[in-house]
Image (spheres, helix red, strand yellow):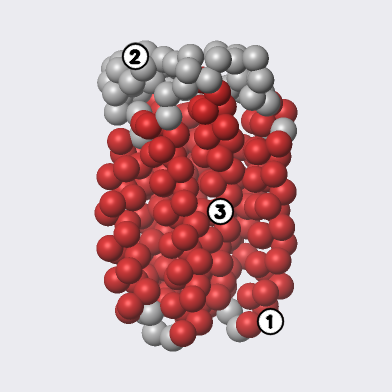
Amino acid sequence: PNGIGSMPRTDIDPYVLDAPLGSRSRPSWRGRLHLIALWSAIPLLVGLAVESDAARSRAAVIVYAVGLCSMLAVSTTYHRWVHTIRARAVWRRADHAAIFAAIAGTFSALALTSLDTGPAIAMLVPIWTAAAVGAGFKIFRFHRANRLGAAMYIAIGWAGLALVPAVWHRSGALAVVLLVAGGVVYTVGAAGFGRRWPTLRPATFSYHEIWHAFTIAAAGLHFAAIWTVAT
């Protein structure tokens, strides 16, 4: 519909509804997986913060928790509870921008728990700068940012490979395997989403829900990696 992939139009009636949940363009499970993940993540993240072995690790976990929960909360709101075309045009931008917060938050938790202060800051400044630029493109230049945004998600995420030596030194092979596996799962899910495959049951559970399942699996692997490093 007009207004979804470009700047919101002022001539759109604010009460015009988008396709309803349960249709082929918005399956009934749209956003439900991220809602379940959000409610599951909150107690797990609280537990991680409590179990963190130092004040800096605890602060890093809080940054990570805010980024991850922001992504899940915005996604759930956009996909399930926003129904007018004008509002969805706005929330779609926020949904895509919040992914950068989750990626940078995950990087922050690993950097701050595995590196000394100087090297951690040296890595986090360009990561958060890139995330802010990507989020800005998604908010203000959405109709031009699809390919650029997708490339930036992958590039910033895989920049985490720079942390592998420090993560290995602090926590061993398991944390590295979890970190890399999360990146692989996310990338495979993104490839399927880009191809809009598989469609499965279009009105109930389709390629978009598969994509959300992959993001949750990747986030779970990264959560396990952070738990291993931070506790």
Return the residue nearer the eye: 85 or 212.
85
Q: Kindly state the secondary structure of the residue where label 1 is placed.
A: helix
Q: 141 or 228: which is nearer to us?
A: 141
Disc 1 crowd rating (10 Å Cα; few below 14, some 14-19, many 20+) is few
Q: Is residue 78 left or right of residue 130?
A: left
The three-letter amino acid code for the residue at tag 2 is: Ser
Numbered disc 3: secondary structure? helix
Residue 159 visible, this orientation: yes
Distance between mark 2 and mark 1 Cα atoms: 51 Å
Mark 3 crowd level (few <14, some 14–19, many ≥20, 10 Å Cα)? many
Q: Are marks 2 and 3 in contact (CB under 8 Å)?
A: no
Q: Which mark is residue 47?
A: none
Q: Which residue is mark 2?
A: 23
Please give the residue where the numbered disc 3 appears in the rendered image: 101
Residue at 38% in and 20% down: 26
Q: Residue at x 72, y 48 (%)?
A: 133
Q: Dot 2: few (<14), some (14–19), or many (≥20) neighbours within 10 Å?
A: few
Q: Could you tell which of marks 2 and 3 lies nearer the N-terminus?
A: 2
- Please state the horizontal and vertical placement of residue 28, each as a whole percent of the image: 29, 23
Amino acid carrying mark 3 in the image: Ala
* Residue with the mark numbered 1: 118
Q: Report, in whole angstroms, how far the alpha carbon at label 2 lies from the one at label 3.
A: 30 Å
Q: Nearer the viewer, mark 2 or mark 1?
A: 2
Position of residue 144 measured from the top left corner of the image (x, y, whole percent): 72, 28
Mark found first going from the N terminus, 2 or 1: 2
The residue at the point 48 percent across, 18 percent down is 15
The quadrant of the picture occupied by the N terminus is top right
